[in-house]
Image (spheres, rainbow, N blue to C red):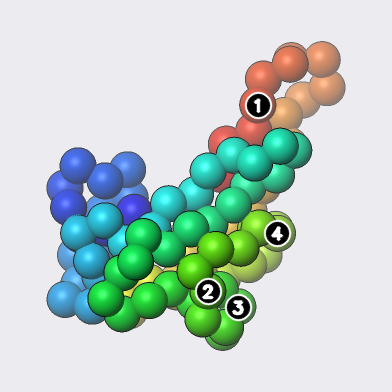
Amino acid sequence: MGRDAACGVCLDHPKVSRSHGVVTGCGAGWLYTDRDSRNGSWISNRPVSQRPLCTGDVITVGDSLLIFLRLEEPAGTGAAGHP
């Protein structure tokens, strides 16, 4: 996520870096990593550089609040969940 139009999540705000942060799969879960952004990232009102994500976590980037929800795949599909 970031200010750059090429980002999967584009946030047009002066406090958002071009490439601000990224959510990646990590084993059976998801991980948020700040990409050394100028104004930092916050999860549930705490500054973070990297942190595993839990359902309901609020990621603050610039003036945007993003709520992380992990949607479970139906049993037997074998497909990985998406953030």
For marks 4 and 1 on the same chain, the one whose residue lies earlier in the sequence: 4
| Residue 39 appearing in the image | yes
Residue flagged by tag 3: what amino acid is it?
Answer: Ser
Residue visible at 59% across and 39% down? 25
According to the picture, the residue beneath numbered tag 4 turns out to be: 54
Q: Is residue 38 above or below residue 79?
A: below
Give the mark toward the camera: 2 or 3: 2
Precedes in sequence: disc 3 or disc 1: 3
Marks 3 and 1 sit apart, C-alpha to C-alpha, by 25 Å
Quick one: quadrant of the N terminus? bottom left
Q: CA distance from mark 4 to mark 1?
A: 16 Å
| Of residues 12 and 20, the one drawn nearer to the viewer in this rendering | 20
**Residue 71 pos. (x, y %):** 67, 41
Label at residue 44: 3
Q: Is residue 67 left or right of residue 55?
A: left
The residue under label 1 is which amino acid type?
Answer: Ala
Q: CA distance from mark 1 to mark 2?
A: 26 Å
Q: Decide: few, some or many residues near mark 2? Use Cα within 10 Å; few <14, some 14-19, many ≥20.
A: some
Q: Around disc 1, counting alpha carbons within 10 Å, would you say few (fewer than 14), some (14 to 19), or many (20 or more)? A: few
Q: SS at mark 3? A: loop
Amino acid carrying mark 4 in the image: Cys
At mark 1, the secondary structure is loop
Q: Cβ–Cβ below 8 Å for labels 4 and 3?
A: no
Determine crowd level at label 4: few under 14, some 14-19, many 20+ residues with C-alpha closer than 10 A.
some
Gap in angstroms between the C-alphas marked 2 and 3: 10 Å
Q: Which residue is mark 1?
A: 80
The mark closer to the camera, 1 or 2, is 2
Viewer-proximal residue among 18 and 82 = 18
Q: Which mark is residue 48?
A: 2
